[in-house]
Image (cartoon, helix red, strand yellow):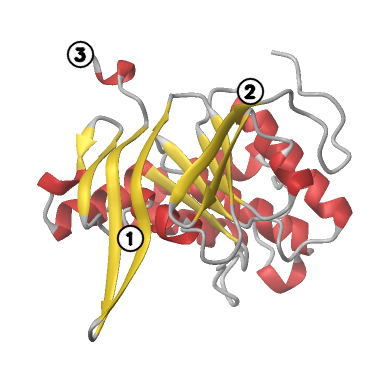
Amino acid sequence: MDAAEHAVIELRRVTKTYRTGSVEVHALRGIDLTVARGDFVAIMGASGSGKSTLMNIVGCLDVPSTGQFFLDGIDVRTLDEAHIAKVRNRRIGFVFQSFNLIPRTSAIANVELPLAYAGVRRRERRGLALQALTAVGLADRVEHLPTELSGGQQQRAAVARALVTSPALILADEPTGNLDSAATAEIMQLFMNLNREGRTIVLITHEPEVAACAKRVVRLRDGHIISDETQLVGAGVGVGVWPKA
């Protein structure tokens, strides 16, 4: 099968059990989930539902206790730690609630970081970082420090950093949690536009109006998927209708 035909994410009967002394916590209980290339999925659930554990597995930050996880056609179980780190850096673009920008470093230098870790030469990574910042509307802020950017602009820089390696997947964990309503609408419009361009996005959120911007909503409870629904999009955070292709 051609690599382009693989689902970006495929979980088969995935479980995750944490042990503390004699106590076992079953965080995930037999999860089956497939995310196709170009999909936009919001994952929702109350505290303790398993959504953070699921995010950690999908982001190659943790491994299942049992079951299989394929990322872009790769069986993650077959990889050693060094290869998992490479997969994390090149195939997954992370966007976090707290932005995670280096404070005394310019926007463009922050965006370059994943490329620097991958050994890309300075001239090439500078060009790629500029392209990514331009794509998120920050071409005029490339030399600004994070403290010189608004919250929405900082998150745009974080999205640019996630995009710069052309990953198979953008994984966003509560990306609007620290933003006001106007900046939230701005960031969700950005995600919608990126998805329209073919980016695969998985977003963890507890906010229904944010989840309403996705094409599909998966809900977890007690380590189980209780619903997986395709939806009409564009009803969330005042972003209007889904952008037309």
Q: Classify 10 Å Cα crowding around label 3: few (below 14), some (14-19), many (20 and above).
A: few
Mark 1, residue position: 61
What secondary structure is found at the residue carrying circle 2? helix
Whether label 3 touches label 1, CB < 8 Å: no
* Lower sequence index among marks 3 and 1: 3
Mark number for residue 227? none
What secondary structure is found at the residue carrying circle 1? loop
Residue at 57% in and 68% down:
101
- Report x, y in % for residue 237: 84, 43
Residue at 30% in and 22% down:
6
- Report x, y in % for residue 167: 41, 38
| Mark 2: amino acid | Arg
* Lower sequence index among marks 2 and 1: 1
| Mark 1: amino acid | Leu
Residue at 67% in and 41% down:
136
Residue at 69% in and 42% down:
211
The answer to whether residue 160 of the structure is visible from this angle is yes
